[in-house]
Image (cartoon, rainbow, N blue to C red):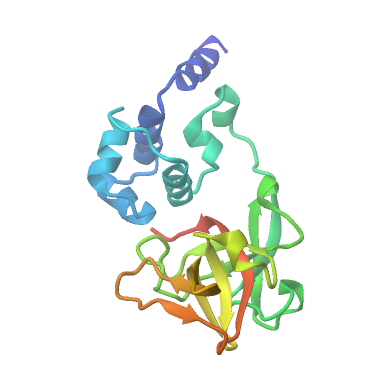
Amino acid sequence: MREHRSLIAERAAESVGARLRRLRKERGLSQAELAAGANVNQGYLSAIERGLANPRRRTIDALAVALNLPQGVLIGGGGAHDNPQPLETRPLPLLGSIPAGPPAESQEQLEMFPVLRHQWSPDYYCLRLSFDSMEPTLKPGDIVLVHYRPHVDPEHVQGRICACLVDGQPTLKRVSVEWREGEPLVILRGDNPRTAPILIDCSRELSIQGIVMRLVGREL
């Protein structure tokens, strides 16, 4: 019992970098493998593990997904994080394409995907990406959590990655709005530099169907 308590105290005192290194090694992953799975520069990952860099929340999220762990385990918050216990999850619809209506009514539903309880909401769904327009931020095959927000005003989601329908065709892009000669111009940009931006003027039909909240699944 004393040894167990000592181990809990030791792990609770770990830095994020030390905890990351331990969890990576427990899973038999090299730095290169984890860096590739989380889409993080290996040099940056090495700096985090050595305590020379503080990871941003988005990096923590990506590393946790690649390690198949809750984010809280990496961040730390007491010994309870490392105690073996079942994770409480709830299922959400997993779709293979951006729905044109409510996710629950979509004919494209593939299966149900479990997310942590605090990430669940009745107006959320999961989307398996086939787009490469958001690389390197998001990769084909990634599973993202999407907040279903049909017809949200583009000005309210400036800079966010959104699931959109452009002239009825699905696309995943980062949304921005510019005002030119008193008229709004919506610009949909991919993070992939090879993807040309889409300009939405009055001649085109745009429907923002949802907002990407976070990455919840990625294969190493």
- Name which quarter of the figure residue 212 lies in: bottom right
Q: Is residue 87 left or right of residue 71?
A: right
Answer above or below: position of 36 versus 88: below
Q: Position of residue 87 (x, y in %)?
A: 64, 43
Q: Looking at the image, which is closer to me, 15 or 174?
A: 174
Q: Residue furthest left?
A: 43
Quick one: which residue is furthest to the top in this view? 2
Pick the front one: 66 or 193? 193
Residue 143: % across, % down: 52, 64
Residue 148 placement (x, y as % from top left): 68, 66
In the displayed structure, 128 sits above or below 84; it is below
Residue at position x 52%, y 35% from top? 73
Q: Residue at x 53, y 41 (%)?
A: 71
Percent from the top left, x then y, of residue 202?
57, 85
User: Which residue occupies the foreground of this view, 143 or 22?
Assistant: 143
Q: Image quadrant of residue 145?
A: bottom right
Question: Which residue appears at 60% of the width and 77% of the height?
Answer: 98
